[in-house]
Image (tube, grey):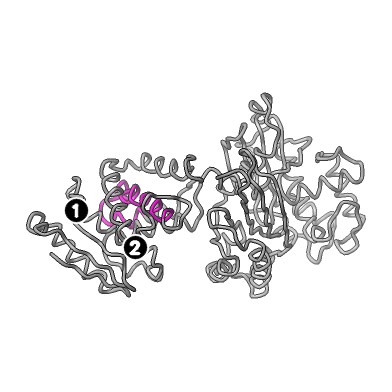
Amino acid sequence: MQNGTRLAAVDLGSNSFRLEIGQLDHGQIHRTEYLKETVRQGNGLDAARNLTPDAMQRGWDALARFGERLAGFKGSQVRAVATQTLREARNRDEFLLRARTILGFGIDVIPGREEARLIYQGVAHMLPQTDASEKERRLVVDIGGRSTEMILGRALQAEIMESYRVGSVAWSMKYFEKGQFTVAAFRAAQVAATAVLDEALSLYARDRWDAAYGASGTIGAVGDVLAAAGVAAPGLVTRDGLAWLVDRLLKAGSADRLRMDGMREDRKAVIGGGVSVLRAVFDLLDIEEMHVAQGALRHGVLYELLERDEGVADLRASTVTRLALRFQVDAAQASRVGDAAASLYVQLDPAARGGETTSRAGRALRKLFWAAQLHEIGTQISHSEYHKHGAYILDNTDAPGFAVNEMHALGQLVLGHRGKLRKLGTILDDAVFARQLLALRLAVILCHARRDPQADALKLAAPAGRTFGITARAGWADEYPQSAHLLREEVVAWQKTDWAVTLRGC
């Protein structure tokens, strides 16, 4: 990316939706615009964990305003991520289908540990870079609306990452009904938060870090209040300051009657739950003071966009390599199938030629190659129906750099690379996915004997409507009768979908 390039990150949090727009300047991103909408989707989950119509509408309305501001941005310049509420929501697909259209860009639902990694990246990039900071062991804590992330790291490298299902919105709804502040409510909320966070003690013990940093809403809000009252230095949250704040909340009695310098109106309704969780963190990890960090999830997302730019190592590529090694994938066969699938895919979508990741076609080609690298990952469980085991692994593994929906799409390619196609359901309606899947299935056929296929064996035509055309080289079917048989069966398999495949020369 060139200096002056604009980048944008959208954070669909449980309490607020945020839009951060920055401009690239010699490897650093400087803010040019910041928008925040208090949506509170976190309190819009019903008893069945479905987003209510009102909660969905609030989210869509906010994204419509963001979408207007993002007009003119390219896909490679924008990334939107969703966190705990949409991880939990059973009807998230209903929300996301319209949300992506309204925003004008894709939205990734990221796993908790991936959220933690990106939070750390955002915090670390916004801290001063000095010789001392390179050695500093950092604890980073982010208390969100429905989850709390904790990370240990040094410099720009996150080392231990966890996400816990406890947050300001969820705890305020559960323990501070109608915004009432009582001693009993604070005690119950802190005890419950400690119970959820208890396992963090072994990972984030006091002797494992040198300085603690707090990111995002709750900790920033507490820091603002303490600084305004002169109880703590600006940018610092202290144990004594937290005790003072709880006392002030108790004297107010309720969120409606709370009047405090530095406290924004949109924070009052969730401050009780947020402070309870923060006190639990302080007590559990023996924290005396915590620095308020300027960086947050959205900043990590912006810097991740830089790392995904062409010519810079993509963390997802190393994650694929790590998974392949862990599950002892046959590297030669994976590479063989990957090369064949890529060659076939560019025939179906010539725009992918060259693999430029700034284009949708180039990104689809790269993800196809990753799926090929992992298509046999399930064989370590059982060779029988290994494609199903592989899809399960990819849907349920920690995969740094990947969003939940990205890993699911890779898993669906792995699931569909052999066997019947009906099991894939509506994902086959996506034309890009259908092209990826056909290329992968044909590559597996050509490489079924675990040897390099002939480069000119098959010629594919870009699909006309919903029909794919395949032409086999003259004499190929006689030279490779088993491959030809599998190819004819492939045509039959596609006849049972809304796609058609025509075959010549075989």
Of the numbered discs 1 and 2, the one sitting upstream in the chain is 2
Compared with residue 79, is residue 131 higher up or lower down, i.e. above or below? above
Residue 361 sits in quarter: bottom left
Say which of 128 and 23 sits in front: 23
User: Is residue 366 located in the magenta-colored stretch of the structure?
Assistant: yes
Q: Can I make out residue 196 in this image?
A: no
Query: Over which residues does the magenta segment extend?
Result: 362-390
Q: Which residue does the image show at 41% across and 44% down from the upper left?
A: 320
Say which of 341 and 347 sits in front: 347
Check disc 1 and report the residue beneath it.
456
Q: Can I make out residue 487 in this image?
A: yes
How far across and down, in percent of the image, does residue 455 sit? Answer: 20, 50
Question: For the residue labelled by badge 2, is the local secondary structure a helix, a strand or a loop?
Answer: helix
Residue 125 sits in quarter: top right
Q: Kindly report which numbered mark, 1 or 2, lies closer to the viewer in this rendering.
A: 1
Check disc 2 and report the residue beneath it.
435
User: Is residue 256 located in the magenta-colored stretch of the structure?
Assistant: no
Decide if residue 347 is on the left or right side of residue 410: left
* Amino acid found under the numbered disc labelled 2: Arg
The quarter of the image holding the N terminus is top right
